[in-house]
Amino acid sequence: MVKLFDEWPDLGSVNIELRKLSSCDSEALGAMTRDDRVYKYLPTFLAERQFEDAKDAVNYINGRLFDDRESLILGIFEDGKFAGLAEFYGYKEQIAKTCVGYRLAYDHWGRGIASTAVGLMVDYLYGRTNIEIITASTMVENIGSAKVLTKNGFEVTARSVPEDWGYDEPTIADKWFR
């Protein structure tokens, strides 16, 4: 068993791979970050949206975020093509807990990619790391994300909880546990 952040995992299924981003992924990442449809149900402060140049975002994700154990963000690839991001965040080593999040480029929605990616994340966390608790949060309106979590064995533990997602008003979110 490894601790989360002791390695960069490389996870995969038949046509979906989760791996460390490279500078070659910057153009596709930049296109995704400029698409407001992708970020409609997400916090405002996500790492990749803090930079004008997506290459700077990749360097930040692969550098400081990982080194400081703040977030471990992997690219999601479908048949080798960039499809989105998978994130482990909120790591609490002393209680063996982390949160998972994900976002897909709009043209990859509705094809089961997010469900497969979350399944790979859960299998990795419970099968190869010391993690014992996995949580997630979704905006109440994000029905698609709720379906992804339900398909992967998550259950709602709290409904309609106000959280700070970086908007002017608190975001009403559901809390999930697996």
Image: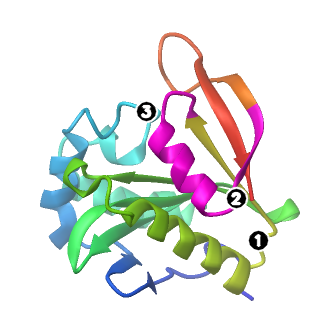
Question: Is there a contact, CB below 8 Å, between mark 2 and mark 1?
Answer: yes
Give the extent of the magenta segment: 139-158
Is 20 rendered above or below residue 108? below
Q: Residues within 10 Å of mark 1 (few under 14, many from 20)?
A: many
Image spot of residue 133 (x, y percent): 79, 62
* Residue, disc 2: 98
Residue situated in front as seen by the camera: 130 or 58: 130
Is 171 rendered above or below residue 40? above
Q: Is residue 152 magenta?
A: yes
Residue 156 visible to an observer of this rendering: yes
* Residue, disc 1: 131
Identify the residue at horizontal 20%, vertical 67% (top origin).
25
Amino acid of disc 3: Tyr
Is 10 rendered above or below residue 105? below
Structure colour scheme = rainbow
Q: Residues within 10 Å of mark 2 (few under 14, many from 20)?
A: many
